Amino acid sequence: MKEFSFKINGQEYKTTVEEKENGKAEVTVNGKKYDVELPATAKKATAAAPKAHTAAPAAAKAAPQGGMQVKSPLPGSIIKVLVSVGQAVKKGDTLLTLESMKMENTVAAECDGTVKQVAVQPGQNVMQDDLLVVLE
């Protein structure tokens, strides 16, 4: 079980995340329990060891006009941010490392682009779907 304490707009939240079977988890926020289903990308990330990026795929797509928002696939804590604003990235490049349920998960670029915004920093707790990085 992983415990998190954080504040959003001055409101304090205390949470726990307990991984269950078949990609499900029990998340408790300020005493209220939620049964959640993790997205397929999160299930894959917790089940497989991180892979080193060797080359961009031949058919890599560019970030859509207006930018692509990279969001957290699951609740956790940011361990490392590996990119900075203005940096060019290729599809599959690791943007950051997120710890969730005692597992380190890499968050990769889903397309080629340039980092427009980094919305998190190491040590910061995030919830599922929180904005991490914007690519343009």
Image (cartoon, rainbow, N blue to C red):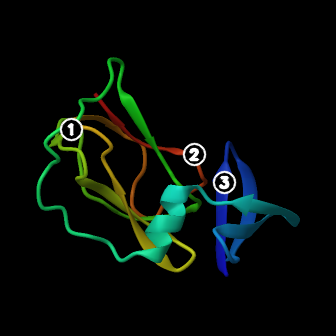
- Kindly report the distance in space between the C-alpha atoms of the residues bearing marks 1 and 2: 23 Å
Q: Which sits earlier in the primary sequence, circle 1 or circle 2?
A: 1
Q: In this view, does 43 lie above or below 19?
A: above
Residue 36, image x, y percentages: 74, 60
Count neighbours of disc 3 (C-alpha within 10 A) and say few if under 14, some if 14 to 19, many if 20 or more: few
The numbered mark at residue 7 is 3
- Near-viewer residue (38 or 14): 38
- Near-viewer residue (14 or 41): 41
Residue 9, image x, y percentages: 68, 42
What amino acid type should be assigned to the residue bearing mark 3? Lys
For label 3, the SS is strand
Q: Which sits earlier in the primary sequence, circle 2 or circle 3?
A: 3
User: Circle 2 sits on which residue?
Assistant: 129
Front label number (1 vs 2)? 1
Residue 101, image x, y percentages: 57, 75
What amino acid type should be assigned to the residue bearing mark 2? Asp
- Near-viewer residue (21 or 89): 21
User: Circle 1 sits on which residue?
Assistant: 60
The residue at the point 62 percent across, 60 percent down is: 38
